[in-house]
Amino acid sequence: MFKQKSAPRGASTAGSVKVAFSAPNESALPRLSFYSDYPSDEITALQFESWALDRLQVLKSIETALLRSKSDADVRQHVAQMMDKYIPLSRAERAGYKDLAYERRKDLVSHHILRLAFARSEDLRAWFLRQEVALFRYRWDACSADERTAFVDSLALDLHPVAADERRILEPSLRACDTRFLAKDASGGDPFAETQFYKIPWHKVLELVAARRVFVHRGTAYVPQDHILSLVVSEYKIHLTAALESTARALPRMEEDSRLAPVLVNLGTQHTNRLDFSASNAALAGQITHADIDKLAAAHFPPCMRSLHMALRRDAHLKHFGRMQYGLFLKGIGLSLEEALVFWRQAFRSKTDEEFQKSYAYNIRHNYGREGKRTDYTPYSCSKIITTNRPSTGDHHGCPFRDFAPDNLRALLSTFGVPEQGLPQVLQLAKEGHPEVACTRVFEITRGLGGEGGAQGRNMHGTTGLVETVGHPNQFFEMSYELAVSRAGGAAGVKKEEGAEDEVGTPAASSASAGAGSGGRLTSSSRWSRGSGGGGGRPRPSQTEPKKEAEVKREEAGDFEFDEMDEGEAARVLDTMDVE
């Protein structure tokens, strides 16, 4: 369908990142592409995943900026910063040729990797298509007129320049389609005379036809050159849609490769903001006590956890899924097992010590990897909270922006400090099915970052502009805590005396480590990641010595109870198995 000028390929060896092109000129390294060519050289497994995650960061930032309805200038600034940070495409005169080759190669390879990851379902393909088209538009705007012309010339598009005689005959109609052509510009020139028009089948520029921005005559649309982007984008959509469908048909063969399949599945779920906030990575690990929770809840907890905390204090009880969601969150912010046992025992004030030890203490230890399979469970992400275990009558878990009725959500947000003028936007985002964006907007408003000109300050990527979209309750907590620390005088915090509380609602001793956030990055599948910082799921259980039969029976019962039973039922099972 398309004929695109492709860059000459060079030889590469296994594990190498070098690509040799035949000539160092800009035409060989275009910044615009339909990605018709397929990468054929080799990359490392780590590059395979890290390059894809970098591109996904940019696609997610585009979605976030558009959903949050910021001004066009704010959106462009934010997207430009993210592109420069993760998948830059420099102009030929601004970078060395080797840098250009690396950038183009990373751009091509990362696109095709994500194409594999997002071809698995119709919803994933639609999401990927929408964001890639938006990325193409931003890159088009960043290119010079010469770059655009060269790119359009490299495509076999069905467009023909309007001849001078025909143009003269149709001039009144052509001028009427654009207010720019009705008068001379500030310098006295005639924009119409300086504009080239093309004849294009009308059904290929439906966007322009619907907006009445082109003249249509006998099935042909007369498109000015500066509106040619509509045609290019239309062709790109057709091309990418067909490529995604073709890739989807080939995926069954890809499943046979045990190295790539887990990585592709992980990438395909990352657009829903799966972040890892394990207790080992908590900035305040071991520094939070049970006595700090009330103050932290009022100052830094997200709406879902604030709601659970309020229900726990009011009712002195939470049902199973509420305890799971809230307990793992507290673990993720740095509450140790010993302090967690004290916190939950005091919170369940209506229970006797015997009832608490028999029905609840085991599961708390299980969450911390001290019982059962010794698995160190991680806090629930927004994605998991939103897509699993819908609450029923008497439950308090879940996501308020998905599960609360509008009136109940309004009441919760009012207690959270959202002013009346900020409620309509948040409620509308929740109604339209964007709970994570709604939660982020609450963060901005309640922290004084939500002015009409866009949020101020730095996001979790280290760039200025829009605040990082909340994808995890523990991310909300860390962003809030770090912001409070920075406003209180920097990373060192405001320390009164040893053991006293500081002005940001946390133990003073913990303030020094507040700046060490998670970074807000998308997570690797950890299959090839270095070190222990990988995320995206539960870590491997720790290795233990062979266990006695009674211990094995206890583990099996504990695991079954953990996933499917409440503690009362689990305790009865353990009793019938005669396990202490």
Image (spheres, rainbow, N blue to C red):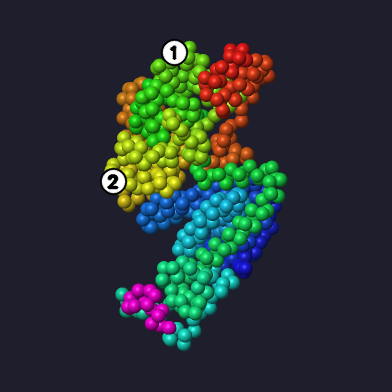
Residue at image position (51%, 64%) is: 233
Q: Position of residue 266 (x, y in %)?
A: 58, 43
Q: Is residue 121 left or right of residue 490?
A: right
Q: Which residue is mark 1?
A: 352
Precedes in sequence: disc 2 or disc 1: 1
Relative image position of residue 58 (x, y in whole percent): 49, 51
* Residue name at image x 52 percent, y 24 percent: 566
Residue 261 place in picture, x, y as percent: 65, 44
Which amino acid, by three-letter code, is at mark 1? Thr
Name the one closer to the observer, 200 or 103. 200
Q: What secondary structure is marked by label 2? A: helix
| Mark 2 to mark 1 CA distance (whole Å) | 46 Å
Magenta segment includes 174? yes
> Looking at the picture, which amino acid does disc 2 mark?
Gln
Residue 421, numbered label: 2
The quadrant of the rendering that contains the N terminus is: bottom right
Q: Nearer the viewer, residue 473 or 249?
A: 249
To which quarter of the image does residue 370 belong? top right
Percent position of residue 221, x then y: 48, 75
Q: Are marks 2 and 1 in contact (CB under 8 Å)?
A: no
**Could one spot residue 260 in this view of the protein?**
yes
Please rate how many residues cluster around mark 1, counting C-alpha atoms within 10 Å: few if below 14, some from 14 to 19, many from 20.
Answer: few
Above or below for 523 versus 397 = below
Which residue is pictured at 52% across the width and 52% down the height? 127
Which residue is depicted at the point 42% across and 19% down?
348
Judge whether 83 appears above or below 414 on screen: below
Specify start and end residues of the magenta stretch as a single range. 170-185
Q: Could you say which disc has been placed on residue 68 in the image?
A: none
